[in-house]
Amino acid sequence: MHKSLYKAALVFLSVFLLLFIGLSVFFYTSLRDQISQEFLQLREGLSALNANVSSLRDPYSSSLSPSGFQEESQIYSDFFLSILSPPKDGHANVLLQIRPKSIRQDDHLYFTWSGSTPMRPQKLEASTQDGITYSCQANLPVSSPISLYLSLEQDGQVTNEMIPFSSSTLLSELAGSLAAYANFRSVSIGNGCFRFTGDITLQDFRRDYFLYPSSFKSSDVVVRLNGKEIDRFPMAVQKDRDHSDACLGISFKDQEWEVNPGALLEFYFEAEDEHGLHYSQMIESYMAPSHGVAEDSMDYSPVPYAYAGYMEIS
């Protein structure tokens, strides 16, 4: 009797174990397949996201490389967009130069743009200087949204590409090219004053736009204390130390401003050109320490609280 019960228990236990193992294998296989499928979907989603992020990169993250809009241009290896003169009547004379990757005698290059008043395509001609660079000029609006395009006609086939453009208007492109920089060789604080020695200059740091300093009717360095204007200095045309070009600048030698503990001293560039456009940019700012302002501690060298911001044109 006991042996029969013992055998029945063993059989029941064996069946239970086999059933448990079978169900475990089934659920494990199903879960593994589900995880694999979700992992593949996640990887595909990340790949798509990376592709979208790559397509939205800053067009000037690699200088003037076209990689901001696409991985690689099929038409050119380099392009240069230059504003030849200050804007007039809302338009500016623009020079477009490109270096084609591969072009033959029977091929044709065209430049066009879309905006409020689209223009007819203009043909780019080979430069007489090197025979490699192709260029054309156009009179484009500076303050309305614009898109630039390049077309290559080759063996009856036309390839169109958008030219990388870091902003929607030429006016903001011009603003992005200009910046006022401070080169203070000595900054100290003591006896209740900030003291500065050095220069502030207006520079074209990309050097692919051309703007005559004389086109400004007025250009000043404005000093603000806690947001309130306390001083204004007109800038003058001088030689750029690095490029020997005429530029706007001003020099300070032991120039002092009285400050209280915790005060914020700011330097701004403000200008107006002959066409009524206004330029404004924060250059640098310095915050006085919460203590030690009244002490004779001229060896103290403050670090700028904020560096040069973006030029704004309105």
Image: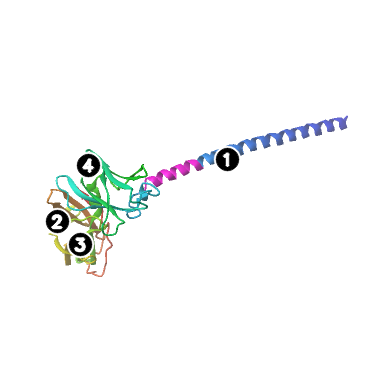
Which secondary structure lies at badge 2? Answer: strand
**Mark 2 or mark 4: which is in front?**
4
Residue at label 3?
200
Earlier in the chain: of badge 4 and badge 3, it is 4
| Mark 3, other Cα within 10 Å: few <14 / some 14–19 / many ≥20 | many
What residue is shown at x 38% (from left), y 47% (from top)? 70
Spatial distance from mark 1 to mark 4, Cα to Cα?
Answer: 51 Å
Q: Residues within 10 Å of mark 2 (few under 14, many from 20)?
A: many
Question: Alpha carbon of mark 2 to alpha carbon of mark 3: how far?
Answer: 12 Å
Q: CA distance from mark 1 to mark 3?
A: 61 Å
Q: Position of residue 284 (x, y in %)?
A: 24, 58
Instruction: Measure how far apart labels 2 and 1 are at the Cα level.
Output: 65 Å
Q: Residue at x 64, y 37 (%)?
A: 29
Residue 54 within the magenta-colored segment of the rendering:
yes
Disc nearest the viewer among 1 and 3: 1
- State the image coordinates of residue 164 (x, y, percent, origin top left): 32, 48
Mark 1 lies on residue? 36
Which quarter of the figure is the N terminus placed in? top right
- Tell me the amino acid under the disc marked 3: Ile
Question: What residue would you read off at disc 2?
Answer: 219
* The disc label shown at residue 115, or none: none
Start-end of magenta stretch = 43-57
Magenta region, mostly helix, strand or loop?
helix
Tell us which disc is closer to us: 1 or 4: 4
Residue neighbourhood size for the residue with mark 1, other residues' Cα within 10 Å, grouped as few (<14), some (14–19), many (≥20): few
